Image (cartoon, rainbow, N blue to C red):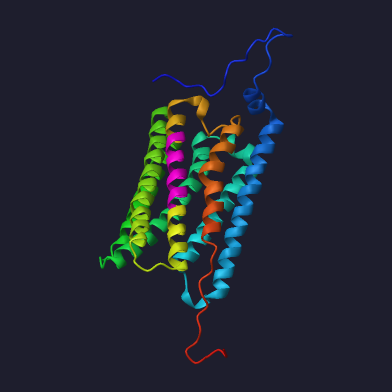
C-alpha cells in the first residue's frame, strides 16, 4: 500500500536556500513537544475535574439513588481523563518506555475506558427505547458487559503477545482492532441514538422538555458518532503510514489534533449537554408551602 507522508517538502523560494519545514521543526523541537503535551495534560485534568464536580453535585442532590447510570458515566469520565492527564504529564517517560508494548498499554488502555464510558450512553438509550416499545431489557446489560469483556480480553492478548514478541504484524492487527472497535461504537450511537431521536420526534405532545430531550439526544449522537468515526479513520491511517503514528514522541502536533478531536472536545461538549442535575426527591410526608 502506498504510504502517505504527513510532512511536506520544503519549497525553494531562491532566497538564502530552502526554508525549514514548519511541521518537522515543531515535531523535532523539545520545547514544542513539552508545550503541546503539557497543554494536553492541562486540558484532560480540567475535564476530569469537571466530571468529578458534576459527580459530587449529583451525589449531593440524590444520594439515595445509589450508583445510577449518570453517576457511573461521570465517574468513568473522571478516571479516563485523569489517567490521560497523568500520562501526558509524564510523556517523556511514557513514550520512551521499553519494551514498546508497555507504551502501547499505557496509551491504548484509556482509549478502551473511553469506549466503555461512552457506550454506556448507548446502553442507557437502548434501555429507554426498549421500554418505550415494550421490548425486553433484561439482556441489554448482559450484552454490554459481554461485548466490553470480549474487547478487553482480545486487547490484553495482543499486549501480551507484543510483550513477548515485538511483532510489527501483531501491532498492525492491534491498530485495526481498535479501529473496528471505534467503528462499532459509532454504529451503536447511530443505531440507538437515531432510533430514540426519531421516536421522540413522533411524540404528539409538544413541550419544552420534549424539545430539550430531542436536542440532547440528537447532539450527543452526532458528537459521539463523529468522534468515534474520526478515531477509526486516524487509527487505520496510522496502521498503514508510520508518519501518522501516534505512539511516538516526535509527533506532538498530530497527537494534539487527534486527542482534541476524539476525546477532549467530545467530552467537554457531552458533559455540557448533560449538565442538568436530577430533580430532588421530595418526601411523601413533606408538603412545601406554596
Residue at image x 38%, y 34%?
173
Find residue 85 and report its horizontal and vertical position in percent.
Answer: 61, 48
Q: Which quadrant of the structure image shows residue 127? A: bottom left
Task: Tell whether 43 sits left or right of 73.
Answer: right
- Tell me, yes or no, if residue 238 can be seen here: yes
User: Which residues are drawn in magenta?
Assistant: 221-234
Task: Say if residue 97 shows up in the picture.
Answer: no
Residue 170 screen position, x and y as percent: 39, 32
Q: Residue at x 51, y 28 (%)?
A: 244
Q: Answer left or right for 205 relative to 280.
A: left
Give how far across and how far down residue 89 sits, in percent.
Answer: 65, 44
Quadrant where the C terminus lies? Answer: bottom right
The quarter of the picture where residue 232 lies is top left
Q: Residue most toward the top?
A: 14
Residue extending farthest to the left is: 135
Residue drawn at 64 percent across, 46 percent down? 41
Q: Is 257 within the magenta?
A: no
Amino acid at each position: 500500500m502506498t504510504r502517505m507522508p504527513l510532512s511536506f517538502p520544503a519549497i525553494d523560494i531562491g532566497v538564502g536556500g530552502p526554508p525549514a519545514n514548519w511541521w518537522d521543526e515543531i515535531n523535532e523541537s523539545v520545547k514544542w513537544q513539552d508545550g503541546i503535551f503539557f497543554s494536553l495534560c492541562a486540558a484532560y485534568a480540567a475535564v476530569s475535574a469537571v466530571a468529578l464536580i458534576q459527580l459530587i453535585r449529583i451525589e449531593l442532590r440524590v444520594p439515595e439513588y445509589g450508583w445510577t447510570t449518570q453517576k457511573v458515566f461521570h465517574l468513568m469520565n473522571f478516571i479516563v481523563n485523569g489517567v490521560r492527564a497523568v500520562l501526558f504529564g509524564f510523556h517523556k517517560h511514557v513514550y520512551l518506555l521499553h519494551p514498546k508494548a508497555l507504551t502501547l498499554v499505557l496509551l491504548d488502555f484509556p482509549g478502551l475506558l473511553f469506549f466503555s464510558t461512552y457506550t454506556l450512553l448507548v446502553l442507557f438509550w437502548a434501555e429507554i427505547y426498549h421500554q418505550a416499545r415494550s421490548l425486553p431489557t433484561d439482556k441489554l446489560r448482559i450484552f454490554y458487559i459481554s461485548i466490553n469483556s470480549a474487547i478487553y480480553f482480545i486487547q490484553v492478548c495482543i499486549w501480551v503477545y507484543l510483550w513477548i514478541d515485538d511483532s510489527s504484524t501483531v501491532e498492525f492487527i492491534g491498530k485495526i482492532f481498535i479501529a473496528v472497535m471505534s467503528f462499532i461504537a459509532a454504529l451503536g450511537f447511530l443505531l440507538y441514538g437515531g432510533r430514540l431521536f426519531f421516536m421522540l420526534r413522533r411524540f404528539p405532545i409538544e413541550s419544552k422538555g420534549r424539545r430539550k430531550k430531542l436536542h440532547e439526544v440528537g447532539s450527543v449522537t452526532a458528537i459521539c458518532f463523529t468522534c468515534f468515526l474520526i478515531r477509526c479513520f486516524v487509527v487505520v491511517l496510522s496502521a498503514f503510514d508510520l508518519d501518522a503514528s501516534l505512539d511516538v514522541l516526535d509527533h506532538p502536533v498530530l497527537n494534539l489534533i487527534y486527542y482534541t478531536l476524539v476525546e477532549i472536545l467530545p467530552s467537554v461538549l457531552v458533559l455540557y449537554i448533560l449538565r442538568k442535575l436530577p430533580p430532588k426527591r421530595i418526601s411523601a410526608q413533606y408538603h412545601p408551602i406554596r
